[in-house]
Image (cartoon, coloured by chain):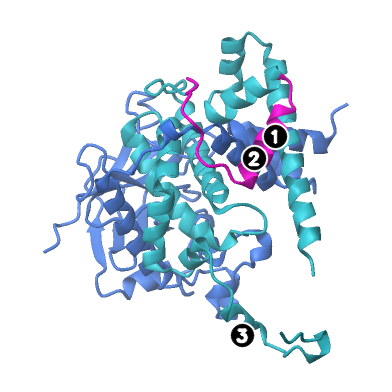
Amino acid sequence: MTTLSLTSRPQYSIRECNLNVSESLLQRVAGLDEPAMQECMNTYGGLVWSLARRLSPSPTDAEEAVQEIFVSLWKNASRFDPARMKEATFVSMIARRRLIDRWRKIKRRQEIPTEFDFTDVDDSPAPERDEDVQRAMEALSALSPAQQQVLRLAVHGGLSHQQISERTGFPLGTVKTHARRGLQRVRDTLTEAETDATAGGAP
Amino acid sequence: MSTDYDRMVDLVADFATVGLSSSEEQLLSDLRAAGVTVDSEEFEFAAAALDRGFTTSADSDELPVHLRERIMTDARAFISQAQHPLRLAGTEADTSGTPDVIVMRRNGILPWFAAAAAILLAAFAWWPASEPSIRDMVDGAPDEQVTRWANNDAGITGEVHWSPSLQNGYLTFTGLDVNDPESVQYQLWIFDAQRNPRFNAVDGGVFNIEQADGTVIVPINAKLGVADPALFAITTEPPGGVVKHDPELDPERFRIILTAEPDPVG
């Protein structure tokens, strides 16, 4: 085996190096690659569809939301940074942003939709968990049971602070504090991991 | 004692979990303008990772076939639109002549999205007729469709200009009332004949009218692809627009103002 020293390493231009880097699916989507867009829909359609059904007032609204989410995903695809988060988390983030915006507009006129049961806990096995999810759930497990409950109802159940207060019996102020400080703790854990990965991965 | 930074953290945490009210959005905007910075995407990242963690296998389901077809129609429209880069009056793109460098990635906004955002901004101002604009693009498109607003009691006149190939267009109005954006905004709806006939309106964007005199030109900002526009409608809605027009919400304030029905194509 031949070992090359640093001084004998051939010099490549950035362009040449990039030729050897395989593009992520979202990077190909950002390049307006129609087959990549189809693959993106095939890969993440189920994730987006489940989010939209859970956080939309009706199946029809969920369908419209899914279309808007994919358009938003294509627009934002070039911002995806694989060093920062997993692709599925990025897709989920864009989807949630769009759904919360739609949901906020709906809530101006009516209370939380009831067509879907947002909060029933299911015993089915969880899908495969990548590092993002593992770290988030580890951070969650370090929170108090009350904080965990509030975060679950807010993030996954789509309930407002007021609705969580009514459901749990916690004062409104406590609900807000639990949701905000709880999410902040999870955020801290994820960003620390991101920083560690960046530092450890540096040449 | 709560500092501006703490208030900002609370707001971005709420933004990532339950969304913000209009007044909270304004407060967030004020804090940003005052130089307080918190990376809201980090909180969205945390919420998204948690949400995935809470998700069970039973939550997952495949997209319906008809929805998959619609998404791919949108994809083709998106590609078409992106391959016709827009040059917008009053933006950096106009002065540089290179629309693909309007906003750098550092700001977290890709160029295409920046163009769309600039369209929205442009809706708040008069459109300078002498500069390159969406109007020039659409007027130069071989498939431009022009439809007049239907007769109405208020005497409002104008047209809808739409190009199917560009998936873009603009509206003209004469006599449309100035609105108070804090109370009510105008919203465009585009009814697509190839979508579900009961729920077929595509959000065409929210806009304001700031001057009563003369002709006002407003770019269309369709949120989805429109295969076959069958009807354009303008409504008044609560600030920020709505997902669905509700004629019973407040019929005095929120109502259908104008419609325009294109001739069937082909």
Q: Give the chain of mark 3.
A: A
Q: Chain of mark 2?
A: A
Amino acid marked by disc 1: Glu
Quarter residue A52 falls in:
top left
For the point 41% across and 73% down, which residue is it? Answer: B83
Residue B153 part of the magenta-drawn span: no
Q: Nearer the viewer, residue A184 or B19?
A: A184
Residue carrying label 3: A16
Which residue occupies 27% across, 53% down?
B69
Residue A80 lies, in percent from the top left, at 59, 59
Q: Residue furthest left?
A: B266
User: Element at badge 1?
Assistant: helix
**Chain with colour cyan in the figure:** A
Please report the residue visible at 56 percent of the width from the left and 12 percent of the height from the top: A167
Give percent across and percent down for residue B115.
Answer: 51, 64
Specify whether disc 1 shares its chain with disc 3.
yes
Magenta residues span A120-144
Task: Identify residue type, mark 2.
Answer: Gln
| Host chain of mark 1 | A
Q: Position of residue A61 (x, y in %)?
A: 36, 36
Label 2, on which residue?
Answer: A134
